[in-house]
Amino acid sequence: MRTGPSGILLTLLPLLATGCAAPAGDLGRPQPSFIHDKVLPLVGSYTAAGRGEPVSRAPLTDDERQLRNLAYAILMPPYERQEWEKGFAEMRRTRIFANDVPAFDSFGYADTLLQTHYRSSTARYARIIEDIRADTVRADPFFATARRVVEMDTIREKSLSHVTRLTADEREMAMARVAENRMLIGWVYRRFGERIVGYRLALERLVIATPAPAAVGAERALRAFEDRLAHIPVVTQTATVGGTITK
């Protein structure tokens, strides 16, 4: 375990991210925040580079910025009371932690849903339906933006061989951005799958704890979400990230 000032900072950063969480706006996009837009990403760039991950200094295009804004609500835990997980999610989003550290807790959503006090047992079903439908709505805008980003990245890659006096640094910066974009798209797709697992576990436990007719509506919402994701084309291009292949 890390000790010293750097280790203490990394230990406290999840608390900082949680306590200073950026307010969410339309489709869960984060509102402007100095901590979340400047400080944490700067720290994340250094730590990601230290892990051997691609880090680009190129300015973001409009679609790349939109892609990251739309990813915010998908990468955050759906339940606002999952405070500790929210802090770690922000550390992963800003690349201070690798995007698989710590491992996803499939039971976290279910535990929080069942432990939260509601005046009516059917309110828990209403909550899970609301969360599932919110994710369903988020899928199309994100992946529509992702397709545009991938199309522009393909043009960027093909253009590299035609640029006059292209420097090694410029090439590395361009390819690092392509890898960053593809890594984020693949991460969001995986995160949607993890959230489906969480919703399924929560619904199963909820039916056992407090069976109600509302379970039918929750099951239908979950199946609709699964069907929607199944019909979204997966980005097939690959990029080398830290010695591994990311899709």
Image: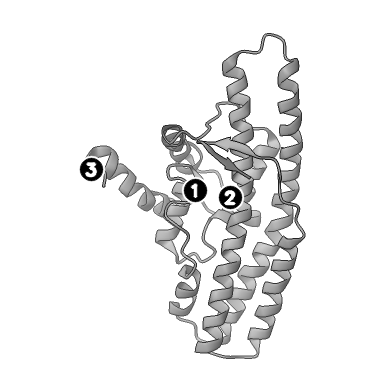
For residue 187, the mark is: 2
Image quadrant in which you'd find residue 214: bottom right
Looking at the rendered structure, the kind of residue marked 3 is: Thr
Q: Are marks 1 and 2 in contact (CB under 8 Å)?
A: yes
SS class, disc 3: loop
SS class, disc 1: loop
SS class, disc 2: helix
Is residue 29 in view from this perspective?
no
Residue located at (67% from left, 32% from top): 61
Q: Residue furthest top?
A: 165
* Label located before the other in sequence (1 or 3): 3
Looking at the rendered structure, the kind of residue marked 2 is: Trp
In the rendered structure, the answer to whether residue 80 lies left or right of residue 122 reads: left
**In whole angstroms, how far apart are the C-alphas of marks 3 and 2?**
30 Å
* Label located before the other in sequence (3 or 2): 3
**In whole angstroms, how far apart are the C-alphas of marks 1 and 2?**
8 Å
Residue located at (75% from left, 56% from top): 232
